[in-house]
Amino acid sequence: MHASLAHPALRENAQLQLQLLDSELQRRKFETAAGLLEKKRYEEAQRALHAFRSTYRESPYAKKAGELAELARYHLWSSTQQRPAEAEILRQNAERLFLQARYDEALALLQQLEMDFRGTAAADQGSRLREQIQAKTGRAGPTVGTAHSPTPTTVESRRMAEIQKMARDFAVRSQAESQ
């Protein structure tokens, strides 16, 4: 053993510093994986969170990583289940706005529909409705993909706020427990 680590206090101090560094590394890896969930990269988040949990089984973040991995799995499942319904709701709302002669609002919804749900039956129907509005009003409207991304729906905003709050609460609680 190196002479400078022979003293018990120095050895203990070195061990504590290593534990602190390892804890910080775990926290950063957990936050990176949880960040993928916040960015709606659910498949990557699920893989990263499972990998974190299997690598750091004893970590104070392991349980939360498992919970967030399940949340990512749910988002993957729900997107396949809810996607057609969400697209149809947007299309129906745009059609309602069209019938109320609120053309600008209808065009904005139709653009969101075409950007977010390209390839669905509702998006195809929405494209035809957009053409009707453009013919009726004599204006072209924005081309899909040229405008800024639409703002997230209220439900998506609430989900993301909930995920962020859970991750922050867990990080604060884990940090308090380690001190």
Image: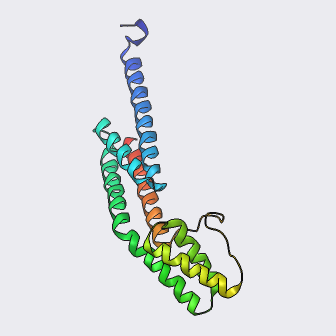
Q: Say which quarter of the image contains residue 8.
A: top left
Furthest residue to the bottom? 100
Q: In which quarter of the image is the N terminus?
A: top left
Residue 154, x across and y down, in percent = 49, 73
In the image, what residue occupies the spot 49% across and 73% down?
Answer: 123
Q: Which of 41 and 145 is in front in this view?
A: 145
Is 148 placed left or right of 175 in the picture? right
Is 22 placed left or right of 134 in the picture? left
Q: Which of 35 and 58 is in front in this view?
A: 35
Q: How is the image coloured?
A: rainbow
Q: Nearer the viewer, residue 86 or 54?
A: 86
Q: Which of 108 and 135 is in front in this view?
A: 135
Above or below residue 16? Residue 133 is below
Above or below residue 148? Residue 100 is below
Residue 115, x across and y down, in percent = 54, 66
Residue 99, x across and y down, in percent = 56, 92
Residue 167, x across and y down, in percent = 42, 53
In the image, what residue occupies the spot 61% across and 67% down?
Answer: 144
